Amino acid sequence: MNAGVIRVSPRWLALREPADAEARARDLVERLGRVLPPTGRRVIHDLGCGTGAMGRWLAPLLAGEQHWVLHDRDADLLALAAAGRPRAAADGAPVTVEARRTDLAAVQARDLTGASLITASALLDLLTEHELDRLAGLCAAAGCPALLTLSVTGRVEIAPASPLDGCVAAAFDAHQRRATERGRLLGPDAVEFAARALRSLGAEVLVRPSPWRLGREHGGLTAEWFTGWVGAACEQEIELSGRCEPYARERVRKARAGELEVVVGHADLLVLP
Ligand SMILES: C[S@@+](CC[C@H](N)C(=O)[O-])C[C@H]1O[C@@H](n2cnc3c(N)ncnc32)[C@H](O)[C@@H]1O
């Protein structure tokens, strides 16, 4: 997974962390709490951890001692993740972390031996079919539950609507599915692909919607998301750039002023071996 590496900015991850925390499906965590071993230290591997947002969200929702193994290929993000570790479990039990510089392409089943839980957040849609198949195999081999959250589904609703929204959405989805040196990315097809791959390996897979619902109080995030959304669409379809300029300027102004409401579709998967 080395070729075509896109670095994710810590500023973007910080901006989206509260909306991510609001969006993730809580009922899957309740179900997860019931299937984890009732006693003993839980070892949780967070794949593509970024700055560690998944641990900061999930660790305080689970009872019992936890050891988080944070995996990312980006050393700067990993350092932030280690510094911003979760404080305590739901019942006050200690939470420890260990940062591992990892390229997921190189992860072997033995690296996940003894895992009580595997997590990933905002990762699956960045993978190719081959990479996601491999990840499904690793989850199945680990024999523990996996909570794979916030994969984009392609659903975008913007209010007030504009006739250009549909064209931009289609071009953005095509960009998400673009061919790279590693293969074609899954983008909005990741959830369905992952669920099928994991079920074919005998796992039970629960899927829940986990959309961002951005409104007045999310102006900064909405403006940043919209800028990235239009930018990727125009990169995919160059001729959109000319048509999008006044539209994008006005939409960003509205977003900053809290006058734009946006739903961005995501889905969460709980995988039970
Ligand atoms: C969109 S960010 C999500 C970060 C974090 N999970 C969160 O929810 O805030 C995707 C993360 O996956 C990491 N990543 C992507 N592909 C990877 C790979 N092949 N090996 C290791 N890390 C990878 C990126 O460096 C980035 O930190």
Image (cartoon, grey):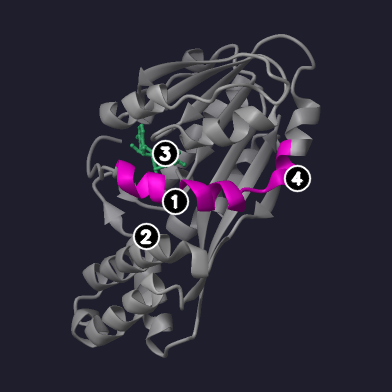
Residue 155 in view:
no
Q: Nearer the viewer, mark 4 or mark 2?
A: 4
Quarter-of-image position of residue 257: bottom left
User: In the figure, residue 93 lies in which quadrant?
Assistant: top right
Where, quadrant-wise, is the C terminus in this rendering? top right
- 200 or 160, nearer to the observer: 160
Residue 57: x %, y % from top left? 57, 36
Residue at the spot x=50%, y=64% of the render?
217
Which range of residues does the magenta coloring cover? 10-29
Decide whether the magenta segment is chiefly helix, strand or loop: helix
Residue 142 visible (yes or no): yes
Q: Residue sitting at 51 percent across and 70 percent down?
A: 216
* Residue with the mark numbered 4: 27
Left or right, residue 76 beside residue 192: left
Q: CA distance from mark 4 to mark 2?
A: 28 Å
Q: Which mark is residue 16?
A: 1
Residue reaching furthest to the top: 40
Mark linked to residue 176: 2
Q: State which tag comes first along the sequence, 2 or 3.
A: 3
Residue 159 is inside the magenta segment: no
Q: What crowding class fits label 4: few (fewer than 14 Cα within 10 Å), some (14-19), or many (20 or more)?
A: few
- Label 4: element kind: helix
Q: What is the C-alpha distance between the residues marked 1 and 2?
A: 19 Å
Dot label at residue 134: none
- In front: label 1 or label 2: 1
In 3D space, how far apart are the residues under numbered discs 3 and 4 (Cα atoms)? 28 Å
Q: Residues within 10 Å of mark 3 (few under 14, many from 20)?
A: some
CA gap, disc 4 and disc 1: 21 Å
